[in-house]
Image (cartoon, rainbow, N blue to C red):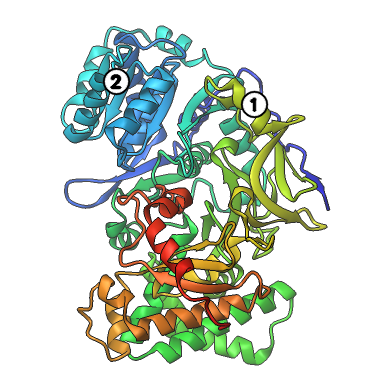
Amino acid sequence: MREFSVPPLVNVPRDTNITDLLVRQAAKASNPALFSRLDDAGQWQDIVATDFLADVSALAKGLIASGVQAGDRVGIMSRTRYEWALVDFAVWFAGGVSVPIYETSSPSQVAWNLGDSGAVAAFGETGHHENVIRQAATSEGLTALTHVWQLEGGGLEALRDAGRDISDADLEARRNAAKLNDTATIIYTSGTTGRPKGCELTHGNFVELSENALATSLRQIVNEQARTIMFLPLAHVFARFISVLAVAAGATVAHTPDIKHLLPDLQSYKPTFLLAVPRVFEKVYNSALTKAEDGGKGAIFHKAADTAIAYSRARQDGKIGLGLKVRHAIFDKLVYGKLRAAMGGHVAHAVSGGGPLGERLGHFFQGIGLQILEGYGLTETTAPVSVNTPERIKIGTVGAPLPGNTVKIADDGEILTRGACVMRGYYKRDDLAAEAFADGWFRTGDIGQLDADGFLTITGRKKEIIVTAGGKNVVPALLEDQIRADALVSQVLVVGDNRPFIGALVTLDEEALPGWLQRHNLPAETTLAEAADNETVRSAVQELINHANQSVSQAEAIKSFRIVPSDFTEASGHLTPSMKVKRAQVVKDFETVIEEMYAAPKPTRA
């Protein structure tokens, strides 16, 4: 299969915009709860559509009174929290264009987003964020930026007061100014390579994609009875799209700004579905495995995991044997039920995006009663191009195109797409159109395959394909994903471009390391740097690499590796906020380690 198209199931009127989704919910007799937030007593309090609409309107009037015009850009720099969604909708109600900024951004990054977009105002979560924004504006001479409001303190209340003289009619006229083709937001790519580019996503991108997604069996998951808790950065397109989709469906969204609080928040909020990047699911699995091994129950967990995977695969094939059913029922009481309880006890589905999950993890979670629907997309495609749904799922793939989208595989294997999901273009960068588009198709830069049913499988990133000195093409992700799946490993970077053989940089998981060391009769207080040189640790990593090497040819196999004595993190500049490795930055910063690896005596075959 070279091309697969799914026609739209919903045709949205051209004069629609995102704000209509909220107005529609507020007009319902059911008046669904759209958000939930913790009160001072630590209890979750629902916010119904009419109350959310009233506050959005009050803030939007304040923006209008402060001089924000239709089409003006407004920055939002904050952790994931309720007020993020509140001011996002307020900007849209005022006719503006929101520009998200990761709250971990440096002043120079903030200056680029605000300066390149020409923002006239910005929201900062705290005094710290406000200072970063003002510092960026001063240092770069951003004279267009005339207002900065804090989400905490009295910033929002001052904005509400400022808009008291703006009439409802004026607000309604401004709210209706934008149409489907108008820009709703400019999201800057997180920049794994080069300067971030501003992706212009329209109201149509969000509305048409949401309406058509909800016309599929995804409606079984996202509806007025559904609850989710958002912990991914709302500056990221994946979380942003789900936020809008939830409003379109009338689902309830809570927020937790710190992933360290996720477990207790899951248990108190009891969501029905989750969204996360694959690394989160890897950590959930590895944490459960580590806890079991630390408690002397590692063998039981391994048997339970194997049973879950076998059960899921058998169910996908349509035939589950009696013995497997019995084993599954036993482990459901011993293991699976406890894992579901740790996530609140009501989670039945999760949506995974931002990278490959892997078939084994997909079957494991499906086998324990949590169906993970893996999807695929980029910032440039408003997140989902394709996604598995409850009624159409093939674990190991990223699903078929959503209605209104088309996927095509180019002659060189690159995934091309067009349809409701594709952005208008890069803001002020018409020169990039020829690079980004080919005959109306958006070039994703990923490589993949389509099966006869239109299900897409991602096999790698075109720009990341390594060509060895011997001319062999190697897809790093095929090796990296297998090695990183082990609890001991945090990150892996395969290298070898124009080199005589394939090598790898490996980092250790700081949380899992102490327990692993104890189980291998090593001091738990051993540091990352000490562990990197420990022969027992190195042997364990070598075993993981040997196993991964079995899936590729000898020319593609990893012949040598180095354990880096520190992890790749967002703070170190080696991960994007969506937890993708910045390859170019890692190669640059660890150039000495890489050169030493290739200067060492030629490795023997493992």
- Residue visible at 55% across and 82% down? 604
Q: Is residue 279 left or right of residue 212?
A: left
| x then y, percent, for residue 109 | 34, 33
Tell whether label 2 touches label 1 (CB within 8 Å). Answer: no
| x then y, percent, for residue 237 | 49, 40
Disc number for residue 315: none
Residue 59 to residue 469: above or below: above
| x then y, percent, for residue 66 | 29, 11
Identify residue type, mark 1: Ala
SS assignment at label 1: helix
Residue 424 to residue 210: above or below: above
Would you say residue 418 is visible in this rendering? yes
| x then y, percent, for residue 603 | 52, 78
Q: CA distance from mark 1 to mark 2?
A: 28 Å
Look at mark 1 in the image and give the residue it sits on.
433
Look at mark 2 in the image and give the residue it sits on.
140
The one of 371 and 35 positioned closer to us in this rendering: 371
- Residue visible at 37% across and 19% down? 119
